[in-house]
Amino acid sequence: MTVKPEKARGPRTRRGAKKDPKLAVLLAALAHVPFDGFTDKVLGQAAMEAGVPRETLARLFPEGPLSLVEVFSDHVDAEMTRKLSKVKLSTLKVRERIATAVRLRLVSLRPHKEAARRAAAFLTLPPHVATGMKLLYRTVDAIWRGIGDTSTDFNFYTKRAILAAVYSTTLMRWFSDTSEDEHITDEFLRHRIDDVMRFEKFKAQLRERASGWPSISEFLNPGGSASRRPGARGA
């Protein structure tokens, strides 16, 4: 599937900003972040440009620039989910759905690529790593839910852990991709998903082979079957 780029700020985003002061501050800040990073100065400047009072700013962004990064990530997740809802996913295989969702998140980030790069670097700082992990989880969770996954068993966690690795490495590759239509990133993503699918196939084959192996209890208690014969006495 080919994903076409969108303009940085469409009418829908501007209307939303008027109703949402958080979004208004974020959009104002994104004009400064590529040059100055995620800082208190940028946050204060953005609040002034968005007409948000200082006391309101402290309530909306209690952790300052870190909260701004969180709002940025959540906003991009929401944009990805909105775009994904317009895709006819029922015609796609699971791997194609995942690839489409990852591409759509990158499309949502594309107008603010340098800001995204700054955010990623910001989240690698030791005090911010926990927040970075939390935001990565939210993103992969939004992807799985967006493509229709409703699992609640152990696979719920393994799917998200695997996708977190796929998405984060693809994001790093995207930051350095200057190719036309970002086809290098698309190719990288395809290979990462292929690797996962091969691993899942290997796990399924291993489970099938292991189903005929003796159980642990049979190894530990090889005479156990005899003890259950009629007339057998316990110790």
Image: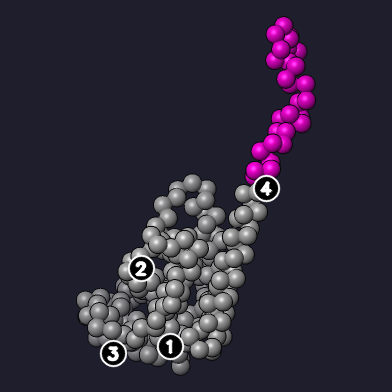
Q: Which residue is mark 2?
A: 87
Q: CA distance from mark 1 to mark 4?
A: 49 Å
Q: Using the image, determine if residue 18 lies above or below residue 235.
A: below
Q: CA distance from mark 2 to mark 1?
A: 31 Å
**Element under disc 1:** helix
**Pointer 3 and pointer 1: residues touching (CB < 8 Å)?**
no
Query: Which residue type carries mark 3?
Result: Glu
Q: Which residue is mark 3?
A: 49
Q: Is residue 3 magenta?
A: no
Q: Residues within 10 Å of mark 3 (few under 14, many from 20)?
A: some
Query: Which residue type carries mark 1?
Result: Val
Q: Which mark is residue 33?
A: 1
Q: Quadrant of residue 6?
A: bottom left
Q: Which mark is residue 182?
A: none
Residue at image position (72%, 33%) is 214
Q: In this picture, which residue range is highlighted in magenta? A: 206-235
Q: CA distance from mark 3 to mark 4?
A: 59 Å
Question: In terms of depth relative to the viewer, which is nearer, 168 or 88?
Answer: 88
Q: Position of residue 93 (x, y in %)?
A: 47, 61
Q: CA distance from mark 2 to mark 3?
A: 36 Å
Q: Which residue is mark 4?
A: 206
Badge nearest the viewer, 2 or 1:
2
